């Protein structure tokens, strides 16, 4: 048509994948001589329905691929979460094992032990732990027991008895408790029955006062103190025994640790 310059048809692969992009194709500002030419011009630039559908499908594909890529990025980032959870779980297990080992009873001088050897009644005996921390049993005259747990001592006795008995099965049971000196709690001063007590798990001041039968009538209970030795040196902790025992104030019921010494002074008048 004279005076009209038509835009060439673009291939589908090179056009923007959007109806909006199609609507924004630059149209030259040209003059149309008559109505017939106007109709032919509008028909030339009328969007092809099949082309529009193809563009919409292509756009949907791009969006889906982008969404999947975003999900993949999140999953790769979140992949470190199970690793962190596993590390935390292992740390908790190690801490629980450490606390369990710390709470196991350790044999000390003065303990009374029962050594039982399965199907060997002549080797099963009750023995005390001597002041030097050793015990004597049939066929094993001298073995260190202090500082070991009952299971550890049983295993070592089994190793020694293998020289005389085929596959010995040894069990060590603690009949009476004293414990090593560094795991005892000592109560001195104005207690009715001052003594050293084998430490037990979760032991408190009230537990040792029950074991020592309370305070004497001359005790200054609220001036008592716990002397504790640690890595930072000696520590003195005030204890209100009178409030605990007479008034039932459980906030004064402090937790004890192995090696603590509870000192109860005498009243001034």
Image (spheres, rainbow, N blue to C red):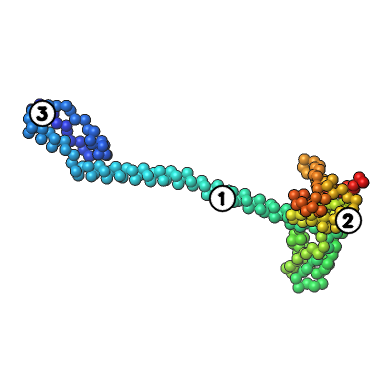
Question: What's the residue at 25%, 36% (across, down)?
Answer: 21
CB of mark 1 within 8 Å of CB of mark 3? Answer: no
Residue 192 image label: 2
Which dot, 1 or 3, sits closer to the camera?
3
Residue reaching furthest front? 247
- Name the element at disc 1: helix
From where the camera sits, is residue 84 visible?
A: yes
Q: Is residue 100 left or right of residue 30?
A: right
- Name the element at disc 3: loop
Determine whether 113 is above or below 180 in the image.
below
Question: What's the residue at 76%, 73% (across, down)?
Answer: 119
Determine whether 83 is above or below 38 in the image.
below
Q: Earlier in the sequence, mark 3 or mark 2?
A: 3
Q: Check disc 3 and report the residue beneath it.
A: 32
Crowding at label 1, few (<14), some or many (≥20) Cα neighbours within 10 Å?
A: few
Q: Earlier in the sequence, mark 1 or mark 3?
A: 3
Question: What's the residue at 78%, 68% (across, down)?
Answer: 116
Which dot, 3 or 2, sits closer to the camera?
2
Q: Check disc 1 and report the residue beneath it.
A: 86
From where the camera sits, is residue 255 visible?
A: no
Q: Earlier in the sequence, mark 2 or mark 1?
A: 1
């Amino acid at each position: 048509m004279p005076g009209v310059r038509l835009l060439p048809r673009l291939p589908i692969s090179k056009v923007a994948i959007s109806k909006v992009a199609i609507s924004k194709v630059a149209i030259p500002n040209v003059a149309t001589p008559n109505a017939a030419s106007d109709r032919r011009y509008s028909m030339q630039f009328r969007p092809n329905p099949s082309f529009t559908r193809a563009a919409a499908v292509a756009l949907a594909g791009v969006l889906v691929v982008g969404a999947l890529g975003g999900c993949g990025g999140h999953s790769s980032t979140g992949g470190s979460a199970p690793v962190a959870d596993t590390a935390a779980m292992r740390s908790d297990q190690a801490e629980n094992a450490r606390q369990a080992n710390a709470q196991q009873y350790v044999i000390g001088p003065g303990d009374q032990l029962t050594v039982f050897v399965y199907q060997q009644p002549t080797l099963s005996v009750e023995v005390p732990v001597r002041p030097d921390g050793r015990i004597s049993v049939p066929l094993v005259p001298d073995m260190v027991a202090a500082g070991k747990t009952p299971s550890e001592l049983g295993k070592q006795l089994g190793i020694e008895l293998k020289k005389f008995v085929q596959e010995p099965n040894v069990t060590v049971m603690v009949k009476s408790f004293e414990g090593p000196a560094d795991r005892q709690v000592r109560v001195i001063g104005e207690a009715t029955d001052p003594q050293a007590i084998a430490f037990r798990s979760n032991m408190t001041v009230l537990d040792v006062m029950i074991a020592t039968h309370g305070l004497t009538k001359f005790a200054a209970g609220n001036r008592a103190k716990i002397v504790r030795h640690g890595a930072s040196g000696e520590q003195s902790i005030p204890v209100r025994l009178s409030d605990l025992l007479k008034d039932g104030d459980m906030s004064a019921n402090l937790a004890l640790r192995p090696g603590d010494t509870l000192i109860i002074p005498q009243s001034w008048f």
